Image (tube, rainbow, N blue to C red):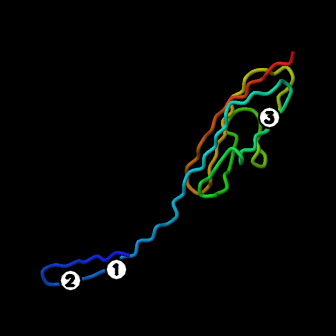
Amino acid sequence: MSTLKVYNSEYETIFTIVIEVVKVNRDPTLSIFDQTINEGTSLVLDLYELSNDPDGDRIIFRLNSGPGMIIGGKYIYDNEIGDITPKSVQIEYTDGISNIVKFESFNIFIIPNP
C-alpha cells in the first residue's frame, strides 16, 4: 500500500493506492533431442515428460510438420521396413493461457536392418 499526496499552493489531497500484482504467465518449455530407431520399429515420446510449465498449466501439443501423430500427449511414429530416410518433425505447443505458441524440432534417424 502506498500513499500519494497531491497538492497545490492552496489544497492538499491524500490518496491511498493499493497495487495488486496479478499472476504472470510464464511460457512452457519442451526439449526433444534427435532420436534414432531401428528400421521397422516405432518411436513413442511422452511429451508431458519432456515438457515443463513453471505455472503448472496443462500444455497443449499439435504436430506442425513431419510424420507421425500426437495422441493423448504422446508423439507416435511407426517406421516401415524399407524406409530409412531421416525424418524432420516439428511440434507446436502452448499452455493456452497466453497467445504465445512455441515450436520444438527434432530429427528421427533410421538404422537399416542388416
* Type of amino acid at the residue the image marks with label 3: Leu
Residue at numbered disc 3: 43
Q: CA distance from mark 3 to mark 2?
A: 72 Å
First of labels 1, 3 by sequence position = 1
Q: Residues within 10 Å of mark 1 (few under 14, many from 20)?
A: few
* Type of amino acid at the residue the image marks with label 2: Glu
Element under disc 2 = strand
Residue at numbered disc 2: 12
Tell me which corner region of the image, top left, top right, bottom left or bottom right, holds residue 54: bottom right
Residue at numbered disc 1: 16
Q: CA distance from mark 1 to mark 2?
A: 13 Å
* Type of amino acid at the residue the image marks with label 1: Thr
Residue 78 numbered mark, or none: none
Element under disc 1 = strand
- Which residue appears at 69% of the width and 47% of the height? 61
First of labels 3, 2 by sequence position = 2
